[in-house]
């Protein structure tokens, strides 16, 4: 069983790579098996390895959870802030991302409950929310993510963030994240990031996204 997301943000040093939770081909054709394997086994693993290496000689940080490390970034020693931001963000973002993808046959999964209510309230419709996510992903210059976040005032907002910046850095809760680094799609889609985003938005596990609101 994959660890719950609550457990993930509560994780402390030494950090570990969570299991993908499904076969590498389980989200084909949206995400090809080769990309899924490389992305999880190499890229995500590297964020975990690098985060642990950066914190190794800071035992005072070993009792601080991943969520706290990101939300309180400026409180930690300057020497490790960049590593926490990049490697810790990379770890948190990817651990959520795997669970946001729906394995098995493409389904008609849709937001429900509070998430559906808030999407309609803040975007007008699910399709409008998806369009905003796609636009944020296409428009993100260079590497980064398109995010649906819950703000401090309990609203849903779409934004693009660079690199591995987590919404947690600004005190906003990640609800849904779409990885638009080239490593996430280039083997299959090359320069066609918009096509990748269309495919990805058709394979979202909206139950995972909805569960984020209950944190
Ligand atoms: Mn990635």
Image: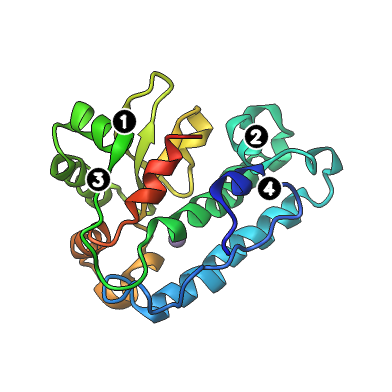
In the image: residue 210, left or right of residue 134: right
Measured as percent of width and height from the top left, residue 129 is found at 20, 40
* Ligand 1, image quadrant it occupies: bottom left
Measured as percent of width and height from the top left, residue 133 is found at 24, 45
Q: Which mark is residue 156?
A: 1
Measured as percent of width and height from the top left, residue 159 is found at 31, 37
Give the quarter of the image for residue 122.
top left
In front of the other: label 1 or label 3? 1
Q: Quick one: label 2 or label 4, which is nearer the N terminus?
A: 4
Q: Are marks 3 and 2 in contact (CB under 8 Å)?
A: no
**Distance of label 2 from label 1 (alpha carbons):** 22 Å
Q: Which mark is residue 11?
A: 4
**Distance of label 1 from label 3 (alpha carbons):** 12 Å
- Packing grade of label 1 (10 A; few <14, some 14-19, many >=20) is many
Q: Quick one: label 2 or label 1, which is nearer the N terminus?
A: 2
Q: Quick one: label 3 or label 2, which is nearer the N terminus?
A: 2
Mark 3 secondary-structure assignment: helix
Q: Is mark 1 within 8 Å of ligand 1?
A: no
Q: Which mark is residue 133?
A: 3
Residue at 31%, 57% (x, y): give it. Answer: 204
Mark 1 secondary-structure assignment: strand
In front of the other: label 2 or label 4? 4
Q: Are marks 2 and 4 in contact (CB under 8 Å)?
A: no
Measured as percent of width and height from the top left, residue 136 is found at 25, 44
The residue that disc 2 covers is 68
Q: Is mark 2 within 8 Å of ligand 1?
A: no
**Distance of label 3 from label 2 (alpha carbons):** 26 Å
Residue at 60%, 66% (x, y): give it. Answer: 45
**Distance of label 2 from label 4 (alpha carbons):** 10 Å
């Amino acid at each position: 069983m994959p660890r719950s997301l609550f457990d993930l943000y509560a994780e402390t040093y030494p950090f570990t790579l969570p299991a993908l939770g499904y076969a590498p081909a389980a989200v084909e054709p949206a995400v090809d098996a080769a990309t899924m394997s490389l992305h999880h086994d190499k890229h995500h693993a590297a964020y975990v390895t690098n985060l642990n290496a950066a914190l190794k000689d800071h035992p005072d940080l070993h009792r601080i959870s991943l969520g706290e490390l990101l939300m309180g970034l400026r409180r930690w020693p300057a020497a490790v802030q960049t590593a926490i931001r990049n490697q810790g963000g990379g770890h948190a973002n990817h651990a959520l991302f795997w669970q946001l993808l729906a394995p098995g046959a493409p389904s008609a999964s849709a937001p429900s409950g509070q998430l559906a209510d808030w999407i309609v309230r803040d975007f007008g419709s699910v399709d409008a929310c998806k369009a905003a996510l796609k636009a944020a992903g296409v428009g993100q210059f260079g590497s980064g993510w398109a995010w649906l976040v819950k703000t401090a005032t309990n609203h849903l907002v779409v934004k693009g963030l660079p690199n591995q910046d987590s919404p947690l850095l600004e005190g906003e809760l990640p609800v849904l994240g779409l990885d638009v680094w080239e490593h996430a799609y280039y083997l299959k889609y090359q320069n066609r990031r918009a096509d990748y985003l269309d495919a990805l938005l058709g394979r979202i596990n909206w139950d995972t996204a909805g569960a984020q609101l209950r944190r």
